[in-house]
Image (cartoon, rainbow, N blue to C red):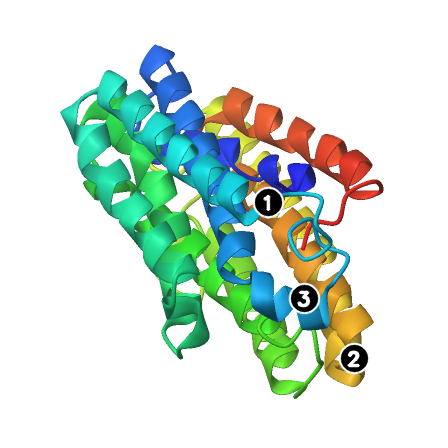
Amino acid sequence: MRLPALFSVPGDALAGTAAAGARPDTRTLLAIGSSLCLYEAGMALNDWADRDVDAVERPHRPLPSGRIRPAAALTAACALTAAGLALAARAGRPALTVAAPLAATVWAYDLGVKHTPAGPVAMGAARGLDLLLGAAATTGRTARALPSAALLGTHTVAVTTVSRQEARGGSPLAPLAALATTALLTRAVTRRPGEPASGPSPATARTPAGSRTGRRHPADATAELLTAACAATYAATAARPYFHAALNPSPPLTQRAVGAGIRATIPLQAALTARSRGTAAALLITALAPLGAKFAKKVSVT
């Protein structure tokens, strides 16, 4: 079930809630519970679907080693999927409307799509839908959360692309692309809403700090500082392992890069939440990072 990776899940719903302009409530908790169930369903189903491949490449895993029966893994995947959909239904019809295609995407990925060129895109779509699940459960709407979902999904596409060669190594192109993606996402997250990609306009730059149009609410300044700090943590977590994997795309370094990419999901979620002025939720997401790192020393993330 890969417990350390589970700490990267609650931030999806919290980031979606913040992006939708709302505060977390009981329906947000239901969305988080649904996400956790569907994520773990995907973990169990993935090992069930890959048991023959793992018998050759990773014989130490639970199924090929005989510690877990294939039927038990498949049963767990089915039960967790049902539980995830049930929790989403409790949160309301909009949440179930998002959770259903999310569950379908998880199953489609594990049962075959991951072995096609569309695999990373499907995984990115699943992570983006998970963020939208939080918005749908809390507010019943998802439109305002779409940009955040796209950014988080793009990060997931990059990590998944690198992971496709973690067992046997491969080309440095995938980690290089992931490194470039990390830089672009860091810039996109820290850019103020309405600010063009090239920076503030000359007219904005000439606005006096004390003028009515240039004055900012203290909460905005706090949110910007927290966003910048979380974005910097995101870049620092992912960049160095990606760079090392690009220099030497061996299985150990590639697996380390994938693990770093998964862990970097947490500060990215926090940055997305903070830029939507969800300061308290961003701090809560940030607190999950050391817990995930602690358990990653005992259980492999990948």
**Considering only vertical position in the picture, is 138 above or below 129?**
above
- What's under tag 2, amino acid-wise? Ser
Where residue 263 appears, x then y in whole percent? Answer: 66, 48
Mark 1, secondary structure of its residue: loop
The residue tagged 1 is 69
In this rendering, is residue 145 above or below 141? below
Percent position of residue 62, x then y:
69, 48
> Three-letter amino acid code at disc 3?
Ala
- Residue located 53% across and 47% down the image: 43
In the rendered view, tell whether residue 48 sits above or below residue 94.
Answer: below
Q: How many marks?
A: 3
Split into 4 quadrants, where in the image is the N terminus? top right
> To which residue does mark 3 refer?
55
Q: Viewer-nearest of labels 3 and 2?
A: 3
Residue matched to label 2:
250
- Packing grade of label 2 (10 A; few <14, some 14-19, many >=20) is many
* Sequence-first disc among 1 and 3: 3
Which is more toward the observer, 208 or 73? 73
Q: Which quadrant would the C terminus be assigned to in this image?
A: bottom right
When the figure is inspected, residue 5 is found, relative to residue 23, above or below; the finding is below
Report the Cα–Cα distance between label 2 and label 1. Answer: 31 Å
Task: Work out which residue is located at the far right of the displayed protein and give it.
Answer: 297
